[in-house]
Image (cartoon, rainbow, N blue to C red):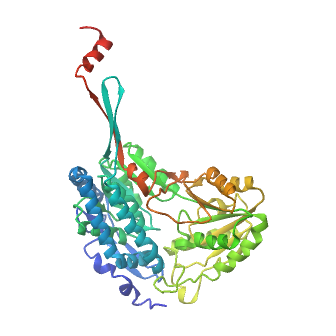
Amino acid sequence: MHNPGNATPDRFPAQDRFADGAQYIAGRLTKGTSGRTHTVVDPATGEDVLTYDLAGPDDVDAAVAAARAAFPGWAGATPGERSDALHRFAAVLAERAEDFARAESLQCGKPLKLTREFDVPGTVDNAAFFAGAARHLQGQSAGEYSGDHTSYVRREPIGVVGSIAPWNYPLQMAAWKILPAIAAGNTIVLKPAEITPLTSLMFAQAATEAGIPDGVINVVSGTGREAGEHLVAHPDVAMTSFTGSTAVGKRVAEVATATVKRLHLELGGKAPFLVFDDADLDAAVHGAVAGSLINTGQDCTAATRAYVQRPLYEALVEKTAALMDTVRVGDPFAPGTDLGPLVSHVQRDRVAAFVDRARSHARVVTGGEVPQGDLKDGAYYRPTLVADAAQDSEVVQSEIFGPVLVVLPFDTDDEGIRLANDTPYGLAASAWSRDVYRANRATREIKAGCVWINDHIPIISEMPHGGYKASGFGKDMSAYSFEEYTQVKHVMFDNTAVAAKDWHRTVFGDR
C-alpha cells in the first residue's frame, strides 16, 4: 500500500497543474468568482488533492460569451478544417495518455489499469471517430417535390451548447459531450462535477494545444445549483446536454423549458441481466461479476438486477459469490488492484445504507461491509451479492450506484422479460442464452437503448448509447449523436421565377 502522507504528489500533482484556477475560459485557466471554494479529495486515502475557487454566475456568463464569440469562426470552418483539428486533438490526447490516466484514477478512485486500458483509450478513439465524422455531416439530396420547385435539406450547427457531466466517468463524459458538438460546428461550455474537474480541464487544455480556437471549448467548475442551473437557464445557450440522475434530469428539463432549448438527457439506469436456463453458466457468472463491478458499480449501464431462470439460480448465486470473493480491493495505483474505492465517503455510505436496509428481507450472500486495516481511510466497500429480494423492493427498483448485484429467480421466459422491464429505467440490458430465437426475442422485447447478448458493458464509438423511458432521450457516440448537435433547415428554390406570381394569383386572384 502507498503511504497516505506523501501519496498525492506521486500520483498526480494537481495543485501545480491548476495553480492559476480551475475554470477554463477563452483558452486560459482562471479562478472562479463565486467567493466559495471546493476541495477535491482522493477517495482512496481521504487526502486533499486540490482546493479551488468555485465558478459562479459571472464565470458562466464569461464562458458563454467566449463560446458565442468563437461560434461564427468555428461554424464557418470547413468540415475538413474541423476534422484536421480533431485529428490533432486525438494525437495530443494519446501523447498525454499517462497524465490523463493518473489524474482520472486520483480524483475518482478508479484502478489505474482501468483508466489506462479503458477510459483513456476510449476517449482517444472517440476523438478519432468524430474527426472522421466531421467530414460526413450530410443533408438530403435535391429533389423536385412541388411543381417547379427544388428542395434540399441542410444540417447546421445549433450554437452554444451547455453541457453538464457526472463524476463517474469525467474524462469520457467530457469527450462524449464535447466531441460531437464541436465536430458539427458548435461551441461549448462544459460543467463537470465539482468533485472531479481535473480531466475535463486537461481535456480543454489539450484542445487548445491541438490548435482548436480559444472559446470553442470552455469549462466551468462549480456546483449544479449555482453554475449548472445558470448555464441551463442562460438565454445564449441554444442546447443543454446533461448526464446524471433522473431526478436532476427532470430539474434540468424544467429550467431549460423557459428558453425552449434543445435537450439531450442521459439519465439513470438499473440494467437487468437476464440468464435463461440454457446459458453458458460460467460465462454468465464472469459477465455478472465484471458487469456489476465495473468502475466499482458506479456506471449507469452496470448489471444491477440479475434474473436467473430457476434451474440455474442457486448455482449462479454460489459461483458469483465465490468469484466476487476473489476480486482484489485496494489502492487504485497498485498493479494488482481490481476494485478501487467509491468516488467519496458520502457515496460509500449511501451504498452501504441500501444494503443494510435490504438485510431485513433479503439474503446478503457476500460482501456488505466496509474494509478495515490499510483501507479504512478510503471510501471502500466490498463487492456485494444480494439474493432473494422482492421485485418491488428498494434494492431492485432504485439505482444504488455501487458494487452491489441483486439476484432474483424466474420461471418462464415471459416472466423473465416482464421482470427485466419492470423498473422505470431503460438504459441497457443483457440476455444470456445459447438459443438464437430466445436471444432475438429478448432484443425485441426488452425496453432499453442497448441490449447485449452473452456479454455486458462493452461500448464502441461507432454505435449509439442512450436510453428509453426514465433513462432519458438522445444518443451519445456514433453518427446519431453527431446529428443530435445539428438543426435541420429546408431550403426551396423556385426554378421558374414566376411561381411566386402564380401562387399570389391562386390565393388572391388577378390584381
Q: Quadrant of residue 173?
A: bottom left
Q: Residue 504: horizontal and vertical position, in percent?
A: 28, 15
Asked if residue 253 shows in the view, the reply is yes
Quarter of the image where the C terminus is located = top left
Locate residue 128 relative to residue 452 in the image: left or right.
left
Q: How many marks?
A: 0
Image coordinates of residue 114 in percent, x first then y, are 47, 76
Residue 217, x across and y down, in percent: 29, 60
Say if 346 sits above or below 34 in the image.
below
Query: In the shown orientation, is residue 415 left or right of residue 342?
Result: right
User: What residue sits 58% from the left and 65% below the top?
Assistant: 456
What x and y, as percent, mark residue 200?
35, 68
Q: Does the rendering let one see residue 422?
A: no
- Indicate whether 443 appears above or below 37: above
Q: Quadrant of residue 443?
A: bottom right
Viewed as shown, does residue 105 lie left or right of 75?
right
The answer to whether residue 325 is above or below residue 250 is below
The residue positioned farthest toward the top in the image shown: 510
Nearer to the camera, 363 or 269: 269
Of 57 and 220, nearer the camera is 220
Seen at 44% across and 91% down, the residue is 3
Give the quadrant of residue 70.
bottom left
